Image (cartoon, rainbow, N blue to C red):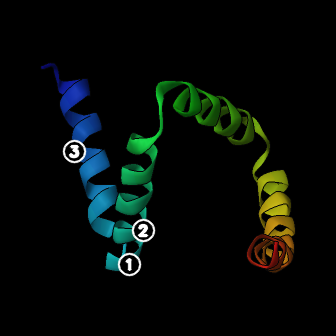
Amino acid sequence: MDTDQRRSMSNRYDRWQALTLEKREDLTQKLRTYKKLDPLQQRQLKERFGKFNKLPKDRQQQLREKIKKCLPRIEQMHWSG
């Protein structure tokens, strides 16, 4: 393992340690859910989020706000139907 790989792993570990416990648990749960998906669904999710991550940060924020506004309506439709 060269120094760049070691530094990269160390940085990832430091970022993980800096997260709050709730955020860590949330990410762990999301990873478990992701691993339960079949490979095709995993690939589709990767592609979708890859496109999202390439957007400018301000556009990502706008989309997150839009999703938060729509979420209660979507959940209402999901549970009522």
Q: Quadrant of residue 21?
A: bottom left
Crowding at label 1, few (<14), some or many (≥20) Cα neighbours within 10 Å? few
The three-letter code of the residue at mark 2 reads Asp
In which quadrant will I find the N terminus?
top left
- Local secondary structure at mark 1: helix
The three-letter code of the residue at mark 3 reads Ser
Left or right of 70 on screen, residue 39: left
- Residue at 77 percent across and 53 percent down: it is 60
Q: Which residue is mark 2?
A: 26
Is residue 80 or residue 28 the one in the foreground?
80
Q: Quadrant of residue 7?
A: top left
Q: How far across and how far down the image is residue 43, in percent?
A: 57, 26
- Sequence-wise first label, 3 or 2: 3
Q: How far across and how far down the image is residue 23, in percent?
A: 41, 71
Q: Which residue is mark 3?
A: 10
Crowding at label 3, few (<14), some or many (≥20) Cα neighbours within 10 Å? few
The three-letter code of the residue at mark 1 reads Glu
- Sequence-wise first label, 3 or 1: 3
